[in-house]
Amino acid sequence: MPPVQLTLRNLHELDNGKCSTAVNHAIRQIMADIADRPADKAKRKVHFSIVATPRLSKDTGVLDGVDTQFIIKTSIPVRQTSVYPMNLDRDHIPNFQRHSPHDPNQNDLPWKEPQGEINKETGEVVGAEADDIQQI
């Protein structure tokens, strides 16, 4: 077969379509990220670069061809959480409050499971002692 001139139109013919497959994969990645995080208005990008380096003959130093590489990169916004303040214990290990992640100094409310049963009609606890029921 005769050599094929490289164009964007026939790039899929190079090396069984590896470059085109990589570009298509990058497009799917950015679209999946948009579907996963539609509230993040940051731009997602696919960068496609062609890097061409002259190849010289080892014997004569004359131009012998070109080494060509295709670089496909994606730019997707970083995934990050909120900032969580934490206190350090005496061993310098960070600690947080399970029920109040944004306030490490918030103590849990004391909770005692009420005894008795809940009346489905009224929502009241029936069969419990008065001090078993917490008042809010």
Image (cartoon, rainbow, N blue to C red):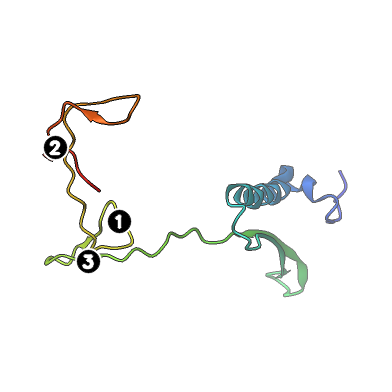
Q: Which is more N-terminal, label 2 or label 3?
A: 3
The mark found on residue 87 in the picture is 3
Judging from the image, what secondary structure is the residue with disc 2 in? helix
Q: Which residue is mark 1?
A: 100
Q: Which is more N-terminal, label 1 or label 2?
A: 1
Q: On the rendered structure, is 26 left or right of 130?
A: right
Disc 3 residue type? Answer: Asn
Disc 2 residue type? Answer: Ala
Q: Cβ–Cβ below 8 Å for labels 3 and 1?
A: no
Judging from the image, what secondary structure is the residue with disc 1 in? loop
Q: Cβ–Cβ below 8 Å for labels 3 and 2?
A: no
**Is residue 56 among what the camera can see?**
no
Q: Residue at x 42, y 62 (%)?
A: 82
Q: Which is more N-terminal, label 1 or label 3?
A: 3
Q: On the rendered structure, is 93 left or right of 79?
A: left
Q: Cβ–Cβ below 8 Å for labels 2 and 1?
A: no
The mark found on residue 130 in the picture is 2
The mark found on residue 31 in the picture is none
Q: Residue at x 49, y 58 (%)?
A: 79
- Give the Cα separation between the discs numbered 3 and 1: 13 Å
Above or below residue 26? Residue 116 is above
Taking depth in this image into account, of 115 and 66 the one nearest to the observer is 115
